[in-house]
Image (spheres, grey):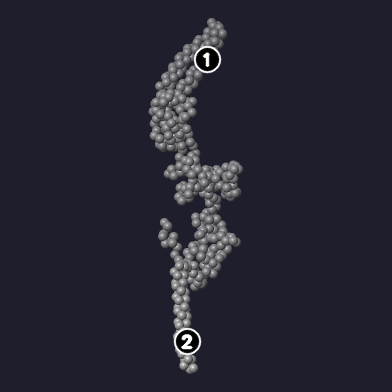
Amino acid sequence: MSGAIDKQAVVERPGGSSSTGKAIARVAVAGLILGLGAAAFHWILPARPASQAAPSGDVAIPVVAGTASVRDLPIWLSGIGTVTPLNVVDVKVRVDGQLQNVAFAEGQQVAAGQMLAQIDPRPYQATLAQAEATRQRDQAQLANARQEVTRSGKLASAGAGTSQTFDAMKAQEAALQATIAADQAAIDAARLNLEFTRVVSPLAGRVGLRQIDPGSIVHASDSAGLVTVTQMAPISVLFSLPQDELAALMDVQHGSDLPVAVDSRDGSKHIADGRLVFINSSVDQSSGQIQLKAEFDNADRALWPGEFISARVLVRTDRAALVVPAQAVLTGETGLYVYLLKPDGTVAAQTVTGGPTVDGFTEIRSGIAAGQEVVLEGQSRLAPGSHVTVVPNPAEAKGPGA
């Protein structure tokens, strides 16, 4: 009996050992699968960028800083305009005839009174000679008539002649005097027509394209002119401003000429300086703009007729204004604000009242004081209380030409 029991125990012991081994194998396989899954997950899922890492309060954000300063701030009103010459003349011939020669080159600068072309003068010279000859004939007749008046007067006084004859001689003398006056007028007209055969420039300026070729027959009634002369110096600029600026212009215009500066159309280059000479008497109702006119010496021919430009008129200068670089001023839900640098290396958002922006500087009317440092670059990463570190301004590092 005991032997049977021992045999059964011997038989069951190997079976229990086999079950334990299977369990261990299953655990090993499960661990291997979990390890492979974790490795695959780590391999497939990209690592989170450093920029998305949880922020740390100990990391200082690099910023560029500037200082609020005091300076005189000129206030300009700007508008788009066009360069317009003061005088443009379409030179036409004033007598008929053949155009003998042209005495200018296209694009040439000419003086007032300079000859531009010559019309055949011979017909007008002949007309002048004929008028002068007629006057000489009538002068001879007048001299004879005066002698007849003298003789008739003596005879009438002596009773040897009639008063009727004397009166007739006096009438003939008066008629001849009138004839000579008409002859003189004809001579003056002939001389004027002869003078018109020389076509001269009515003003100093630049000539354009020639419209008539030498050898052509021209007439005073022709609609086309010989050439156009455009005055280049001085020159004017017509530009427009919103009607809301009219009151400011009128307040400062009385008693002084307002300075006007002209820049290229994109504002990248300064061209010339002049003065305001005219404000239009009415506002354009279609655009709500008021037209202004400024005059410039233009001795260097920097302004060209028809050119589009940007014009600025100086209305006032704010003396000792508190300003900061324009990029420091931000717009928030409550208005304008700047980030102020605090002594502990943090920043604070400070609400300000802004004024005009001129040449990259914005006037601050309230909110900060002169000498306080404000953030110029890097504001997008800031929040009130952020720790910052000031880095050099890249524009200053590159120098004035940056």
Residue displayed at 56% across by 60% down: 331
Reply above or below: 284 against 355: above
Q: Is residue 43 visible?
A: yes
Residue displayed at 44% across by 65% down: 392
Q: Answer with mark 2 or mark 1, whichever residue precedes in sequence.
A: 2
Between 98 and 322, which is closer to the camera in this rendering? 98
Residue displayed at 52% across by 9% down: 152
Image quadrant of residue 321? bottom right
Q: Secondary structure at mark 1?
A: helix
Q: Is residue 309 left or right of residue 122?
A: right
x, y (%) of residue 133? Answer: 44, 17
Label 2, on which residue? 12
How packed mark 1 is, by other alpha carbons closer than 10 Å (few <14, some 14-19, many 20 or more), is some
x, y (%) of residue 199? Answer: 43, 29
Q: Are marks 2 and 1 in contact (CB under 8 Å)?
A: no
How packed mark 2 is, by other alpha carbons closer than 10 Å (few <14, some 14-19, many 20 or more), is few
x, y (%) of residue 237? Answer: 50, 43
Image quadrant of residue 36? bottom left
Between 21 and 150, which is closer to the camera in this rendering? 21
Tally of marks:
2
x, y (%) of residue 212? Answer: 42, 29
Q: CA distance from mark 2 to mark 1?
A: 173 Å
Q: Is residue 24 left or right of residue 348?
A: left
Under mark 1, the amino acid is Ala
Reply above or below: 140 against 265: above
Under mark 2, the amino acid is Glu
Label 1, on which residue? 175
Between 57 and 225, which is closer to the camera in this rendering? 57
Q: Is residue 345 visible?
A: no
